[in-house]
Amino acid sequence: GDEAPRGFLQILGGQKLPEDATNRSGRLELAGWLTDRQNPLTARVMVNRIWQRHFGKGIVGTPNDFGVRGKAPTHPELLDYLAARFVESNWSTKAMHRLMMLSRAYQMSSADDARNANLDVNNDYLWRFNRRRLDAEEIRDAMLATGGALDRRMGGAHPFPPESGWRYTQHKPFIANYESDHRSVYLMQQRIKKHPFLEVFDGADTNATTAERAISTTPIQALFMMNDPLVHKQADNLAVRVGMAYTNEPERIDYAYRLAFGRPATLSEIRDGIAYLQQSRRDMKDAQLPADQQSRAALASYLRVLFSSNEFLFVD
């Protein structure tokens, strides 16, 4: 048959390519087409994804389908406004994050209201904030940051074994995990095996595009926060950080709350914290540890409780 020259699909508009574009890969033309100011879709899809990350669900409830089979936007005018602002800011995601997070809708409480709940049970009209759990990467990064161990630099190469020593097979695959203090975005991702922390807290499947993550609440997650070496290490780091800053327990507890939750501890929380530390030290008497190590271990145990709390794991 006749040769079909490279071009845009007729069903999607059939725009003509520049005459000299046929001699190139076409990637530049595709990028220009996607980000053209006259393209109504790209900016809307992007701001909907950003909105979904902050509010728990998108303005369009089907982030992978803006077509006739997808859900209609709950606030079409808002979606148009955000898309226009996104393009005007030269496609700046930082500007879009700032715009959303400074909005009244984002700064609302997640507290329930019976009257509003009867009228809008799904909170489509944003009468409260949608309470959401942090993603796996956010939980890990938050613990590292609170413990003072987060390395904010870009991650480097992973220490893979030399190729000459590879003896991997279908039944003996490469499954190493290389721990680091860099942000979770730099963790090594394997297609055949998730990182243990990301797997427990519903990390995305690296073999597929994941528009929305499943959110589960399981006993394994609670056990993980109680026993995982990463949690113990960061709780110990925070215990050292708090212990070096203050010498008396009320101030240590208050400082820990400020670091973990971004707020001061109440008098009731300080009293409960002191009681917990005293009981922990009594429980450790048989271990015959020096007094300073008992104090540090008790404080680390208390800080693991803070790490496991809803206030640390959820955005309210």
Image: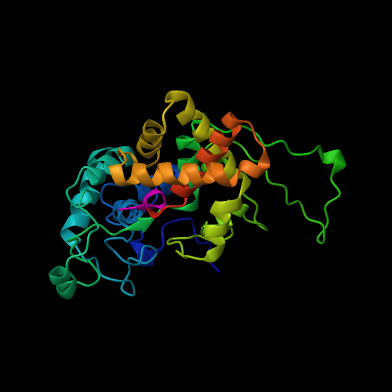
Which residue is found at the position 65% from the left and 56% from the top? Answer: 191
Where does residue 86 sit, x and y in percent of width and height?
A: 26, 44
Q: Residue reaching furthest left? A: 115
Q: In this orientation, which residue lies closer to the viewer: 225 or 34?
A: 225
Residue 181 shows in the view: no
Give how far across and how far down residue 85 sits, in percent: 21, 44
Magenta residues (range): 311-316
- Name above or below for residue 258 compared with residue 245: below
Drawn side of residue 196 relative to residue 311, left or right: right
190 lies left or right of 313: right
Q: Quadrant of residue 109?
A: bottom left
Determine the residue positioned at 36% across, 49% down: 33
Q: Nearer the viewer, residue 48 or 35?
A: 48
- For the residue pair 131 and 233, the one nearer the viewer reads as 233
Asked if residue 176 is among those painted magenta in the image, a careful observer would answer no
Q: Quadrant of residue 274?
A: top left
| Colour mode of the rendering | rainbow
State which quarter of the image contains the N terminus.
Answer: bottom right
Name which residue lies at 74% across and 39% down: 160
Is residue 93 in sight in this rendering? yes
Q: Give x and y (percent) for residue 56.
A: 33, 58
110 or 5: nearer the eye?
110
x and y percent of residue 304 in the render? 50, 46
Question: Would you place residue 116 above or below residue 240 in this image?
Answer: below
Identity of the residue drawn at 55% across and 41% down: 281
Number of numbered discs on residues = 0
Q: In which quarter of the image is residue 125?
A: bottom left
